[in-house]
Amino acid sequence: MVKEKTQLKEFLEAVSVLQWVLSFLFLGLACIILMVYLMFTSLWPLPTLYFIWMVNDWQTPERGGRRTAFVRKWKVWLQFREYFPVKLVKTADLSPNKNYILGSHPHGIMCAGAFACFSTESCGFAETFPGVKSTLAILAGLFKIPLFREYLMSAGLCPVSKPSLVHLLSKSGKGNAVVIVVGGAAESLASSPGINRVVMKQRKGFVRTALEHGADLVPVYSFGENELFQQVIFSDGSLGRRLQDLFKNVMGFAPCLFVGERFALLPFRKPVTTVGDPIPVPKCVTPTEEQVDHYHTLYMEALVKLFHEHKVSCGLSESHKLEII
């Protein structure tokens, strides 16, 4: 029997999620505005010194960053997890003697499942997979934003760039699980309740990287991710879609018009369940196109198999299909 939540409990959960949503949407911009403002006040030496230090520290995000257990274990993330709730399901062991690339699907609007499971300790990743360290790779441009980059690194986030991935998979020992949201901005534009669609067919770079470093591939699916927000979907060729694509091409991410429940910003209280299963990958320093295509096909087949094996237990009907584009 599920214990009914008190009003205080629901309020704490809502506030925890709201701060995350506001941070996702506005914290980077707020940091830029703050630093520019301080440059025109008597406190101008502070941002000046910070920018000098930032230049010297420019490569740190691509060298593993500065993750801190303190931030990843904040109590606020427990309330965040319980809001939906988010659940991490173990379907296979991950050896601490190997490295992994986890492909996270679908992107949804804000990657709530991937964030909770792999950038915080609220879902118990470290206890579930002892000796394996998860690192969520996100848009590299975010690490160029002053102050905001420090917050991102403290949560163990890293840029989804070639130097960053190479460092994590070849210069940080074993037991590294790098999480890449493969569909990216294009997949976020396809996010809508009732639809299970992933952008995958032309995304092969992560497979090549896995082969180059002998990192096993792990397809991961977060059931319920697309149910968290309602999105205005513009048809292909429409002015709205062309503007979204233009913004995506210039900035690297897509502006989505979405609405949740309270204040239109809070996501709907829908359970998010994250599952995954590894695929062994050999090390090939210079993989051929045939090898990349072969493991890319194996990955897509494993993702489809994972989806159908768990869809019913995660609240979907037998008739639900996974669409790969």
Image: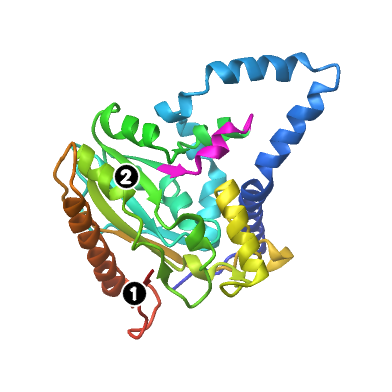
Under circle 2, the secondary element is helix
Q: Nearer the viewer, mark 1 or mark 2?
A: 1
Q: Is residue 228 magenta?
A: no
* Amino acid type at mark 2: Glu
Cβ atoms under marks 1 and 2 closer than 8 Å: no
Outermost residue on the bottom side: it is 319
In which quadrant of the rendered image does the N terminus lie? bottom left
Which of the two residues, 277 or 106, is positioned nearer the viewer here? 106
Q: Would you call the spot at circle 1 few (<14 residues within 10 Å), some (14-19), or many (20 or more)?
A: some
The picture quadrant where one finds residue 27 is top right
Q: Would you call the spot at circle 2 few (<14 residues within 10 Å), some (14-19), or many (20 or more)?
A: few
* Amino acid type at mark 1: Lys
Task: Using the image, tell me which numbered label, if any, was put on residue 311.
Answer: 1
Under circle 1, the secondary element is loop
Give the residues drawn in magenta, as a range.
136-147
Which of the two residues, 67 or 144, is positioned nearer the viewer here? 144
| Residue 259 in sight here | no
Q: Is residue 238 above or below residue 13?
A: below
**Left or right: 214 as drawn, with respect to 84:** left
**Residue at mark 2:** 127
Relative image position of residue 14 (x, y in whole percent): 64, 58
Query: Which badge, 1 or 2, is on the more N-terminal residue?
Result: 2
Task: Using the image, tell me which numbered label, if any, was put on residue 57.
Answer: none
Relative image position of residue 159 (x, y in whole percent): 46, 38
Relative image position of residue 264 (x, y in whole percent): 70, 66
Q: Is residue 59 above or below residue 294?
A: above
In which quadrant of the rendered image does the C terminus lie? bottom left
The picture quadrant where one finds residue 166 is top left
What's the CA distance linking mark 1 and mark 2? 25 Å
Relative image position of residue 6 (x, y in whole percent): 62, 64
